[in-house]
Amino acid sequence: MKPLSHCLLRVETDRFGPFTFQAGVDLEDLVVPLQRVEDAHELFIKTPLNQVASQLEKEVVVSSVFGTNTIEGGTLSEAETARVLQLDPAEVKETEQRRAVNIKAAYDFAQRAAKTAGWRLDLDFIRTVHALITRDLPDPDMVPGEFRDNPKGKITTVGDEAHGGRTKPPQYGGDVKLLMGKLIEWHDCLVANEVPALIRAPLIHFYFETIHPFWDGNGRVGRVIEATLLQAAGYRYAPFAMARHYLDNIDEYFTLFNTCRKNAEKHGAAPNQPFVRFHLEGMRVVIHRLHERGNRIVGVLLYESQIRRALDRKEINARQYTILSQLLDKGPTDLEEMRHSPWYQSLYLKLNDKTRLRDMNALREMELLFLDEASRLWPGTMRAANIKPVGRKGS
């Protein structure tokens, strides 16, 4: 990576005044955080992702759409978001449903772009992402894909007092268009100077939000841009999963935009360092969580294969297989609750307690089933450190 001093771009706008794009980071201070992300990613991609890719991707998309939508005021729960994303397009009627479906459409477009050889960030990509995100949403000021040009007397502000104060981005359309073109030019400079995507992506995110080029949808677009730059650089799943991390840390996320802006106004050293470090820590945390989730999915797949094989070999009977399958589907289940559930009682309608006891004890001895200290039953694949084998009284 070449010295970041090559990537300083000062722009004189017509009405907004001077605007500076700068890396604004201390590379030596970022060596360890960068390495932690790379180490986590290297470990993550060693997971047999071909076995878990479909389920992991579905989970990431739902969580990410929920996260980025909620940040911008969306009201759908995560479960509602999952259901909406499964709807036929003709069934999407409500504005809240449309918001979620639009984000998914933008994600799909961005992921295709990131996988295209030679893809580079440009204004057409940004406009298209915005058009997809805002399609058919009611807003009298907004034309999907078109940059903002404030008429006289209509002022756009960004931020709030709770997160460091309000600021006015460029209001004049000519300045907005100029700065967006320079943002692309500056990103090309970062690429030419071999600035890692882990630094480029949050910097572009930061300056995009600072320019705030659209009437609405800027946060959603900015997070898609960041994710696409990371995915194009080879990072899997985590780029879009960052939206949920930003939601989980929303106060810090919002505040850091103002922190970095004020640092630059005061000519502080490495003014953008806080946001980049926040982003790197988020990537590390997200990749670690995805790795753990991937391992759990692999564990479930292996467990499903194990109990199916045990059934085929007559090592367990159909009743035992049903018990294990139910627990795998439902997760940890209270023992007493299971005893009184209709599906469990139906297994032993014509059988005595001795048979029920024998079935459960056999599963215990094979370590296909465990009971924790709170009398919850766990399938074997979910065994944790605090789980002990099922006692005979619990059958």
Image (cartoon, rainbow, N blue to C red):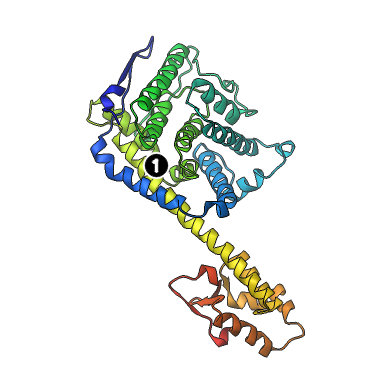
Classify the position of the N terminus by image quarter.
top left
Q: Is residue 379 above or below residue 264?
A: below
Q: Residue 111 appears at what percent x and percent y? A: 55, 36
For image coordinates 53% across by 85% down, the residue present is: 391
Q: Is residue 349 above or below residue 263?
A: below
For image coordinates 31% across by 23% down, the residue present is: 7
Q: Left of 280 or right of it: where is 77?
A: right
Q: Residue 272 appears at what percent x and percent y? A: 31, 32
Q: Left of 81 or right of it: where is 223?
A: left
Classify the position of the C terminus by image quarter.
bottom right
Q: How many marks?
A: 1
Q: Left of 109 or right of it: where is 22?
A: left
For image coordinates 50% across by 13% down, the residue present is: 151
Q: Left of 121 or right of it: where is 135?
A: right
Q: Residue 242 appears at what percent x and percent y? A: 46, 43
The front one of 161 and 73 is 73
From where the camera sits, is residue 168 visible?
Answer: no
Q: Residue 34 appears at what percent x and percent y? A: 33, 42
- The residue under label 1 is 251
Quadrant in the picture for residue 136: top right
Quadrant in the picture for residue 32: top left
Q: Is residue 33 above or below residue 385?
A: above
Kind of residue indicated by mark 1: Asp
Q: Secondary structure at mark 1?
A: helix
